[in-house]
């Protein structure tokens, strides 16, 4: 078991580079998050390939009718993914279908986002969390660069919170951890670095330091 709270967002468009980066970081990160760019550039089988190396979280931001959601979640599960990220704004039945189709796979519900213009979704985090809670999700996605939103979400749950928005989007891993994030998602600041392993180790150290301070 890797002793890290870091999740690598592997948004590279080249399949062999993705596999190479996943290999080099497998003992430095908790998991690798795969999003649509990598899937669209190759195929869904990349999930299974990376799942042989480390835990995989499929960031599919599932947001469709229940039947379509079930098909997507089942695919990710059958490929061996450890977790999946789903939207919840589509309502209870939709997120519930993801949970039901996921089996042992962990479902993380997006209840607030990190980008400019995300106020529409972020202003509704309480309702989204209520729906997600009822649906039986494992954890939440909340922004690591919008600390007051993250702290409000932390107050409302004891479940795992995974936070993007670190590095390239302006957030700091240590601030996000202090505000209540359990897992920190970082993409470009690691895979665009000249030394991705060192970049990831530095973030691990920053997180460790903030844990001892708080
Ligand atoms: O900005 P980065 O390169 O560290 O990548 C962040 C990743 O997290 C990326 O895959 C993006 O799609 C995802 N994400 C957010 O950035 C913000 C959210 O609110 C949810 C997911």
Image (cartoon, rainbow, N blue to C red):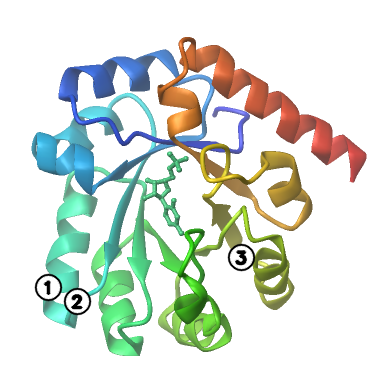
- In the rendered view, tell whether residue 1 sits above or below residue 177: above
x then y, percent, for residue 88: 38, 77
Circles 1 and 2: CB distance less than 8 Å? yes
Please tell me whether mark 1 or mark 2 is closer to you in this view.
2
Circles 1 and 3: CB distance less than 8 Å? no
Please tell me whether mark 2 or mark 3 is closer to you in this view.
2
User: In terms of secondary structure, where does tag 2 sit?
Assistant: loop
Which quadrant would residue 152 be assigned to in this image? bottom right
x then y, percent, for residue 30: 51, 34
- Residue at which label 3 appears: 159
Which quadrant would residue 3 be assigned to in this image? top right
Residue 68 numbered mark, or none: 1
Q: Is residue 137 left or right of residue 150?
A: left
- Residue at which label 2 appears: 64
- Name the one closer to the observer, 198 or 158: 198
| Crowd around label 2: few <14 · some 14–19 · many ≥20 (10 Å) | some
């Amino acid at each position: 078991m890797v002793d890290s709270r870091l999740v690598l967002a592997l948004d590279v468009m080249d399949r062999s580079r993705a596999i190479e980066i996943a290999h080099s970081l497998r003992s430095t990160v908790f998991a690798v998050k795969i999003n649509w760019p990598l899937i669209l550039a190759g195929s869904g089988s990349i999930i299974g390939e990376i799942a042989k190396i480390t835990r995989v979280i499929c960031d599919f931001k599932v947001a469709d009718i229940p039947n379509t959601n079930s098909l997507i979640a089942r695919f990710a599960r059958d490929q061996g993914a450890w977790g999946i990220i789903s939207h919840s704004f589509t309502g209870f039945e939709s997120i519930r279908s993801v949970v039901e189709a996921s089996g042992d796979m962990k479902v993380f519900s997006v209840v607030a986002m990190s980008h400019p213009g995300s106020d529409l979704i972020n202003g509704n985090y309480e309702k989204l969390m209520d729906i997600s809670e009822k649906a039986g999700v494992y954890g939440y996605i909340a922004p690591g660069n919008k600390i007051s939103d993250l702290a409000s979400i932390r107050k409302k749950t004891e479940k795992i919170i995974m936070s993007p928005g670190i590095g390239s989007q302006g957030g700091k891993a240590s601030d996000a951890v202090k505000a209540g994030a359990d897992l920190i998602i970082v993409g470009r600041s690691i895979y665009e670095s000249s030394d991705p392993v060192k970049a990831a180790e530095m973030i691990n150290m920053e997180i460790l330091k903030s844990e001892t301070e708080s």
